[in-house]
């Protein structure tokens, strides 16, 4: 695999992680039907990347495994704080030690931070992907059994996912479609991508969320065909009465695809981020959304 392909895979993995983080409350509602009765979402969710990084040894960080793990702190309605560890096994992954690794991450967090941890595993590969649910070890009468919640993107078919009023359902569907890259004609893949976009726009989500999700879809289900992408842009404009300018999303997409080339060129990255921020401000998007998209400070954005 060439360097560009590796960089592209890594970028897609980061996009998926970002989408999961941005829609984490709805992901929890998806896997836990009673989430709103248990979790106090009004207090927000704190993502703990540093804590997760601290419990992974250096030798594990160097592996070429495709994962998008998240560690989040939740506030429950009973007044307690709980941690949720989300382990995502990316498409193509069939780690024979996956369940052992999930167990190790769980007990390391428990041991280091003295907290209870709920573990969820999401599998984003094909239907034949290995999907372990239990880690078990037995020796001389001592039995260790660790089970955790799992979800595979093909646990629901397209028809069911499209009927759900939950953004994570569309993330799962996007993962299904991304597997088709290189396996079906680009025109057909473009039509599959449009199905997700239309479903997104059929829901009454806020403007920033729609913009963010369209960026994710257009990047994650990547089609290197100008005509197909122009058709996508035009249809989004028509469906939103011209309210969403897909040219802005194209600027973001181009920036995402250039990241490998811009690595180490911080000044160039900053100038590109400022350019995107100016365009997003013209579209009337919130400072919070622009800051999250461009990684610029609120002060820099308001001064533009």
Image (cartoon, rainbow, N blue to C red):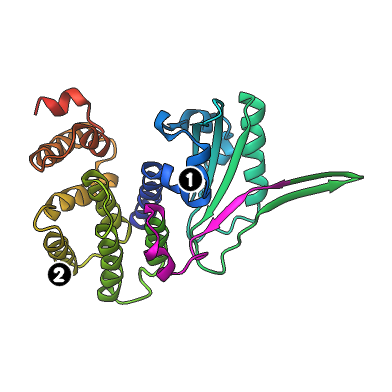
User: At 52% across and 53% down in the image, what residue appears?
Assistant: 122
User: At 37% across and 61% down in the image, what residue appears?
Assistant: 174
Helix, strand or loop at label 1? It is helix
Residue that lies at the very extreme toward the front in this rendered image: 37
Helix, strand or loop at label 2? It is helix
Residue 47's x, y, as percent? Answer: 44, 32
Q: Are marks 1 and 2 in contact (CB under 8 Å)?
A: no
Q: Where is mark 1, residue-wise?
A: 28
Above or below residue 75? Residue 120 is below
In the picture, the disc for residue 304 is none
User: At 24% across and 41% down in the image, what residue appears?
Assistant: 262
Residue that lies at the very extreme toward the right in this rendered image: 140
Is residue 151 found inside the magenta-colored segment of the image? yes
Q: Quadrant of residue 25?
A: top left
Gap between marks 1 and 2, in whole Å? 37 Å
User: At 24% across and 58% down in the image, what residue appears?
Assistant: 201
Question: How crowded is the residue under tag 1: few (<14 C-alpha within 10 Å), some, or many (20+)?
Answer: some
- Magenta part of the chain: 146-168
Residue 43's x, y, as percent? Answer: 42, 28
Residue that lies at the very extreme toward the top in this rendered image: 299
Q: Nearer the viewer, residue 28 or 190?
A: 28
Number of numbered labels in the structure image: 2
In the rendered view, does 239 fall on the left or right side of 145? left
Q: Where is mark 2, residue-wise?
A: 227
Q: Is residue 178 visible?
A: no
* Earlier residue among tags 1 and 2: 1
């Amino acid at each position: 695999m060439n360097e560009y392909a590796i960089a592209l895979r890594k970028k897609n993995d980061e996009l998926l992680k970002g989408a999961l983080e941005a829609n984490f409350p709805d992901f929890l509602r998806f896997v836990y039907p009673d989430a709103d009765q248990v979790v106090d979402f009004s207090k927000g969710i704190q993502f703990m990347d540093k804590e997760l990084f601290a419990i992974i040894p250096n030798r594990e960080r160097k592996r070429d495994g495709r994962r998008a793990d998240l560690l989040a702190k939740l506030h429950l309605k009973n007044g307690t704080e709980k941690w949720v560890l989300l382990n995502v096994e990316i498409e193509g992954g069939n780690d024979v030690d996956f369940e052992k690794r999930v167990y190790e991450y769980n007990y390391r967090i428990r041991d280091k931070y003295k907290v209870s941890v709920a573990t969820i595993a999401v599998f984003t590969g094909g239907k034949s992907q290995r999907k372990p649910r239990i880690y078990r070890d037995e020796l001389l009468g001592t039995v260790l059994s660790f089970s955790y919640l799992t979800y595979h993107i093909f646990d629901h078919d397209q028809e069911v996912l499209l009927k759900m009023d939950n953004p994570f359902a569309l993330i799962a569907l996007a993962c299904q479609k991304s597997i088709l890259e290189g396996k079906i004609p680009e025109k057909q893949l473009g039509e599959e991508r449009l199905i997700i976009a239309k479903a997104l726009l059929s829901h009454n989500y806020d403007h920033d969320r729609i913009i963010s999700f369209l960026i994710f879809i257009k990047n994650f289900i990547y089609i290197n065909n100008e005509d197909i992408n122009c058709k996508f842009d035009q249809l989004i404009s028509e469906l939103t009465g011209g309210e969403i300018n897909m040219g802005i999303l194209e600027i973001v997409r181009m920036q995402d695809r250039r990241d490998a080339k811009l690595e180490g060129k911080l000044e160039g990255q900053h100038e590109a981020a400022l350019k995107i921020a100016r365009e997003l401000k013209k579209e009337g998007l919130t400072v919070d959304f622009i800051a999250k998209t461009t990684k610029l400070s609120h002060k820099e954005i308001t001064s533009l």
